[in-house]
Amino acid sequence: MLVITGASGFIGSCLLGFLNQKGITDIVAVDRFRNPDKKHNLDGKESAEQVEREIFHDWLAQHHEKVSFIFHLGARTDTAETNPEVFERLNTGYSQKLWQQCSQFDIPLLYASSAATYGMGENGFDDRHDLLVRFKPLNLYGKSKNDFDNWVVLQKESPPFWAGLKFFNVYGPNEYHKGRMASVIFHAYRQVKETGRLKLFRSHRPDFKDGEQRRDFIYVKDVLEILFFFFLKKPTSGIYNVGTGKARTFNDLANAVFDSCGSPKSIEYIDTPSDIRESYQYFTEAKISKLRNAGYAEPLTTLEEGVTDYVRNYLEAGKNF
């Protein structure tokens, strides 16, 4: 039996559907299922049981002998949240308890970390464990993920296999519920369809031109393949970057969205909101040599390919994965 926490969220619900496509349905879905905005993410998907996140640790203590692998994808991901207690309870503390249980019960554990741990990237984007203490996340969400990564590598007891995946900018279907935290591609599509124009954040740094801020955008379908690889192969335990290894500009992204919509290009640059301006990442690019050396050799979807598939097969059709 497999477990997916955050099973009605963006990546979690896509993973549930992906595993179903592989013929795997003996899955325990864990989440806060009272959220109506996530309801459609589970449409057409099959699981053996649904467990509320608040009681999952107790459930696992009683049923651990049935569990063969845990995908821990649930977390509070709001980068604008300013209450540290929220992240301590839902991210760091929750994950530490799960790690301890997986260590005790010999259950392989894969958990979601984040590129938000890298901060401004002043220490690079290398997933070496010895660099973790140098990172300076720009918000409490990133700090909670980095705190857990640092805690993990110090533990003397661990699950029989574990991996922490630092997701870069993931986009794709099933993020409809995320609101402000949804991907730039999602918001760009909405703007283009509603106004024929696209607003991008102006650069507030002299070393970047407007729209030339660069991020490592990775399509969720690639993320699913990588998750499945770790589940099947269980390479060396550790923390791994999950990105394409190639940063692309927001202007590139805008052009891909306009092309996918069949609309003429019209971009307006606006000020970055003051509440996130100081914590805004201007450049991210995953170093993925560790992932490749672990044996993941599949080609990664280009930004243009991913945006086209997302727009034409999901956003235009109003479909979930």
Image: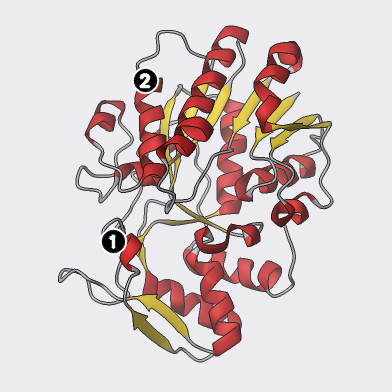
Task: Give the label on residue 282, or none.
Answer: 1
Task: Establish if 14 lies above or below 102.
Answer: below
Q: Residue at x 63, y 26 (%)?
A: 70
Image location of residue 239, percent across then percent down = 41, 30
Q: Is residue 264 above or below residue 201?
A: below
Q: Nearer the viewer, residue 201 or 236?
A: 201
Residue 62's spot in the image, x, y percent? 74, 12
Q: Residues within 10 Å of mark 2 (few under 14, many from 20)?
A: some
In the rendered view, tell whether residue 192 sits above or below residue 152: below
Q: Write the residue at 42% across / 54% down.
A: 80
Q: Residues within 10 Å of mark 1 (few under 14, many from 20)?
A: some
User: Which residue is at the front of the view, 17 or 50?
Assistant: 50
> Element at badge 1?
loop
Asked if the residues shown at circle 1 and circle 2 are in contact, with their CB atoms under 8 angstroms apart, the answer is no
Left or right: residue 94 versus residue 169 is: right
Give the answer, above or below, for where 164 lies relative to 183.
Answer: above
Numbered mark located on residue 163 in the image = none
Give the residue pinned by disc 2: 153
